């Protein structure tokens, strides 16, 4: 959620910090700030801090032109303790002003620590949990900054990614991680640190990922890593095989453009990347070497459990349905945020699948760690190379969606579905799926990019529908079996970016309560594919129409709606198992255009963050 950047080297820190924060804006935030050390030739000068509620551009305007210093830290905040104000923005300082701290995460015992500090005569100037950490470091009398930070961290409880600078130690930044990601970037006689790769790739692709419980010291000459007891660890940098230019393209927009719109239209190319080199026509199967499982291990799987949050959970439901249909093993999806709290039974013959665009979603990461702790096998579907979930899993499928900037996930979600289709195909072919069916699905997968483009060609028609839907305060999304997770994802997207209340129901459940809410003021968006349930779905639409409920139907051209007066959006037909993702794409456009009709910023929906790194 929050974003951290840090720099130590020969360049002026402030411009680098501000640019890094701008590259983290997609994560979601309500305030921003920087602290810089070493200006005016004074080695022991206190860090100078500028911070503002609002956007990074507001911070840029507030930073003086002469803001010299070659060591610095910066932060974008997503409010947890206290509202978005200048005082609550990071960095936070101690009473002397010699210590500056930025922090992602939540300190669970902050209230008790604030009370203790107040009793000791410390005046707290913010509502945040982070400020207590600055005071604890400032009160320490240890000989080194490393020891002072470690001493403070032993007192706090909770999750954190922190970066600390201190006037008495002007050549370094000390960082630490426990549950909130931090990545060290290794440059030429300079070092960077950030909570997201996007802030680093312009300067270096040689990175080191801190593990939970690990700390590091960054100086211009390099970095060292160690535990809280200051014993050394052996973390080494690796060079990532990524294209920094892809992140630059993602950061730039023309007038009137949005990242969400761009990323929706990048889906045909993204789907092609996800499929490239992974389809085996000869044997009617998929090549997924990253699973790290041989056919005998695959055959031993008796159940599949998918774990994700938000849109990743809904596409996980689509994936579980695919796996159950094609591989004929029981499969279901569960919200990762609830999974570990019910003390789950981890079965040795169950394959667990963790789904996350960022690879840093804290609820999903903690679920993965719980599975690993209990001896389970878990693979990841993630979009970020070297992310925490990718490193924790036994294997996985890299999504190849490219950098996704908009908070609302679109192209990454589509590639998650493609990843699940490939996984289901490989599992199925090792088990009972025939080679003929395997080749049928390969043909369907190859058609997907072109068919997604066909859906996108209908944007003007969908936009007109969206403008009418935007006038409603509340909407229903309905679907059955394969269509239900599509409905859930459609409702999620509309809620995220248009702030309209949208609720998803199984079509079959309408008469068990929700039908009472149908009225001319409550439109229903219905997912009606051409499949074995078409007649039942159409009958439900008549029930809605009989109660004068406006209807938008996302369907296939050959579906006869029985003369109903509806707004219809037709999508191309693929293989039945693959249709859900084609039915999902127009719902992305509906949400986008509904929000734009209401004058909202689709890339930065209120109260939300791209990478949810706090519980």
Image (cartoon, rainbow, N blue to C red):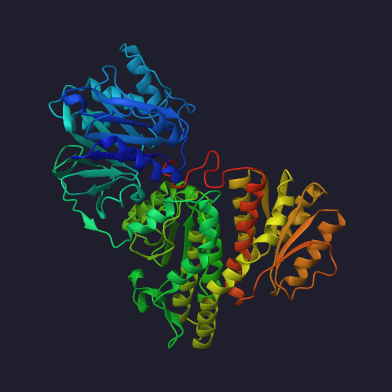
Instruction: Tell me where residue 30 appears, x and y as whole percent.
Output: 47, 34
Q: Report whether residue 477 is seen.
A: no
The image quadrant where one finds the C terminus is top left
In the depicted view, which residue is nearer to us: 246 or 372? Answer: 246
Q: Residue at 47% of width from left, 66% of height from top?
A: 270
Instruction: Tell me where residue 360 appears, x and y as whole percent.
Output: 39, 50
Q: Quadrant of residue 158?
A: top left
Instruction: Tell me where residue 415 appears, x and y as whole percent.
Output: 48, 65
Q: Residue at 48% of width from left, 28% of height from top?
A: 84
In the depicted view, which residue is nearer to us: 30 or 373? Answer: 30
The image quadrant where one finds the N terminus is top left
Looking at the image, residue 410 lies above or below residue 599: below
Instruction: Tell me where residue 44 appears, x and y as whole percent.
Output: 16, 23
Q: In screen coordinates, is 421 left or right of 96? A: right
In the depicted view, which residue is nearer to us: 528 or 393? Answer: 528
Q: Quadrant of residue 295?
A: bottom left
Q: Report whether residue 10 is seen.
A: yes
Q: In screen coordinates, is 207 left or right of 295? A: left
Looking at the image, residue 588 lies above or below residue 67: below
């Amino acid at each position: 959620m929050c974003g951290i950047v840090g720099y130590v080297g020969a360049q002026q820190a402030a411009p680098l910090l501000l640019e890094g924060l701008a590259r983290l804006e997609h994560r979601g935030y309500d305030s921003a700030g920087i602290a810089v050390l070493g200006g005016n030739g004074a080695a022991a000068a206190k860090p100078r801090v500028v911070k503002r509620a609002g956007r990074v551009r507001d911070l840029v305007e507030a930073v003086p032109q002469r803001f010299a210093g070659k060591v610095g830290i910066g932060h974008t905040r997503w409010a947890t303790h206290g509202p978005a104000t200048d005082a609550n923005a990071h960095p936070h300082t101690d009473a002397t002003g010699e210590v500056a701290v930025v922090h992602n995460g939540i300190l669970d015992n902050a209230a008790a620590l604030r009370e203790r500090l107040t009793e000791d005569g410390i005046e707290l100037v913010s509502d945040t949990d982070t400020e207590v950490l600055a005071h604890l470091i400032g009160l320490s009398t240890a000989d080194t900054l490393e020891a002072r930070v470690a001493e403070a961290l032993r007192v706090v409880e909770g999750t954190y990614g922190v970066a600390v600078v201190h006037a008495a130690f002007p050549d370094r930044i000390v960082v630490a991680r426990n549950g909130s990601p931090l990545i060290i970037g290794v440059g030429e006689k300079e070092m960077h640190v950030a909570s997201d790769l996007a802030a680093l790739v312009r300067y270096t692709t040689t990175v080191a990922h801190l593990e939970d419980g690990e700390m590091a010291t960054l100086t211009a000459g390099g970095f060292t890593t160690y535990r809280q007891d200051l014993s050394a660890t052996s973390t080494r940098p690796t060079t990532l095989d990524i294209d920094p230019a892809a992140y630059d393209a993602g950061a730039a927009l023309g007038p009137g453009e949005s990242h969400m719109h761009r990323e929706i239209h990048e889906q045909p190319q993204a789907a092609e990347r996800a499929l490239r080199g992974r389809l085996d026509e000869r044997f009617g199967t998929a090549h997924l070497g990253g699973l790290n499982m041989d056919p005998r291990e695959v055959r031993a799987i008796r159940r599949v459990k998918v774990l994700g949050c938000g849109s990743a959970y809904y596409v996980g439901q689509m994936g579980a349905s695919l796996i159950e249909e094609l591989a004929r093993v029981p499969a279901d999806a569960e919200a990762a945020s609830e999974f570990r709290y019910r003390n789950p039974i981890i079965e040795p013959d169950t394959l667990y699948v963790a789904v996350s665009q960022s690879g840093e979603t804290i609820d999903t990461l903690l679920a993965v760690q719980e599975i690993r702790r209990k001896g389970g096998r878990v693979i990841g579907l993630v979009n970020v190379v070297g992310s925490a979930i990718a490193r924790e899993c036994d294997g996985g499928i890299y999504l190849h969606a490219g950098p996704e900037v908009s908070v609302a996930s679109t192209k990454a979600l589509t590639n998650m579905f493609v990843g699940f289709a490939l996984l289901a195909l490989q599992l199925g072919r090792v088990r009972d799926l025939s080679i003929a069916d395997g080749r049928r699905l390969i043909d369907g997968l190859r058609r997907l990019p072109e068919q997604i483009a066909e859906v996108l060609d209908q944007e003007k028609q969908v936009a007109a529908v969206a403008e009418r839907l935007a006038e409603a305060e509340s909407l229903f999304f309905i679907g059955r079996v394969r269509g239900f997770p599509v409905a859930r994802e459609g409702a999620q997207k509309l809620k995220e970016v248009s702030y309209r209340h949208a609720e998803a129901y199984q079509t079959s459940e309408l008469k068990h309560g929700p039908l009472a809410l149908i009225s001319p003021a409550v439109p229903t968006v219905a997912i009606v594919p051409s499949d074995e349930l078409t007649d039942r779905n159409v009958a439900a639409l008549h029930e809605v129409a009989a109660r004068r409920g406006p209807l938008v139907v996302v369907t296939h051209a050959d579906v006869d709606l029985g003369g109903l007066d509806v707004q219809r959006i037709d999508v191309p037909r693929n293989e039945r198992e693959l249709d859900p993702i084609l039915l999902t794409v127009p719902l992305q456009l509906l949400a986008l255009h509904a929000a734009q009709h209401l004058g909202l910023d689709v890339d930065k929906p209120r109260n939300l963050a791209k990478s949810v790194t706090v519980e």
